[in-house]
Amino acid sequence: MNALSEADSAQNWDHLQDWEQDDGPVKIKVFEQDVLLYFPYHPEAVAAVKALDEADYAAHDKSWTLHVTEANQRQVAGLIAHLEQLFAEAEVLEAEARQRRQDIAPLVLSQLQARFEHPRLELGAEDEHITVRFPYHVKAVNAIKKVDGRIWDGDEKCWRLPCDQERQIRSALAKILKQLQTGR
């Protein structure tokens, strides 16, 4: 390749730098003709990237590398637009789900308080979570750990349970209440 062709080739790919972005769920880095994509796991996003020829996954940094050519340039641009739309829609759905959980938390709390009353079992509602405090016992902790989405809040010394997991919360609280009543 002569010097003029090399310069033309470099100029043709300069526009890829415009694709770079560090904010939002889809992060993009460009190195010459390679585009690196970073995004949270989403089955539809992974399938869309895998559909592109020569998409390589790097497990060490959880990125996808796409080699951009004249032939696939539009396809890569369309994929990036699709991923951005997919994650924007997922963000809206998650915000709506969070709001629903916040709306039902007080109702779920009142139902749980009516059924699971014990002086050493403290139930509360905060944002979209039911908070639970109880004296430490390995069986009680194991019961709580069966609730999907549970979070231990070390600062507040309580478990935060998503209120939309009411069935799992009831099951865990029944086991905790039994342990509190019997000591076993």
Image (cartoon, rainbow, N blue to C red):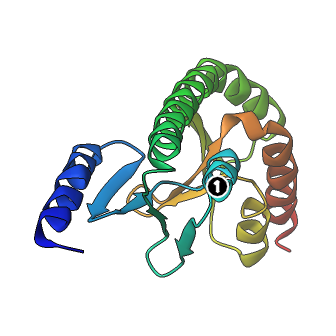
User: Residue drawn at (50%, 37%), measured in percent from left and top?
Assistant: 78
Q: Say which quarter of the image contains residue 61.
A: bottom left
Depth check: give the residue in front, 148 or 84. Answer: 84
| Residue 91 shows in the view | yes
Is 184 left, or right, of 26 in this rendering? right
Q: Quadrant of the C terminus?
A: bottom right
Circle 1 crowding by C-alpha within 10 Å: few under 14, some 14–19, many from 20: some
Against 25, residue 59 (above or below) is below
x, y (%) of residue 72?
Answer: 51, 50
Q: Which residue lies most toward the front here?
A: 2
Depth check: give the residue in front, 47 or 54. Answer: 54
| Residue 21 shows in the view | no
User: Residue drawn at (29%, 60%), measured in percent from left and top?
Assistant: 30
Residue beneath disc 1 = 46
User: Residue drawn at (42%, 47%), measured in percent from left and top?
Assistant: 26
Is 10 left, or right, of 176 in this rendering? left
Q: Say which quarter of the image contains residue 145.
A: bottom right
x, y (%) of residue 167?
Answer: 86, 41
User: Residue drawn at (43%, 57%), measured in percent from left and top?
Assistant: 69
x, y (%) of residue 79?
Answer: 53, 42
Against 102, residue 14 (above or below) is below
Depth check: give the residue in front, 152 or 21. Answer: 21
Against 130, residue 60 (above or below) is below
Q: Quadrant of the N terminus?
A: bottom left
Is 181 left, or right, of 159 in this rendering? right
Q: Say which quarter of the image contains residue 128.
A: top right
x, y (%) of residue 44?
Answer: 69, 45
| Callout 1 secondary element | helix
Count of numbered labels shown in the rendering? 1
Under mark 1, the amino acid is: Val
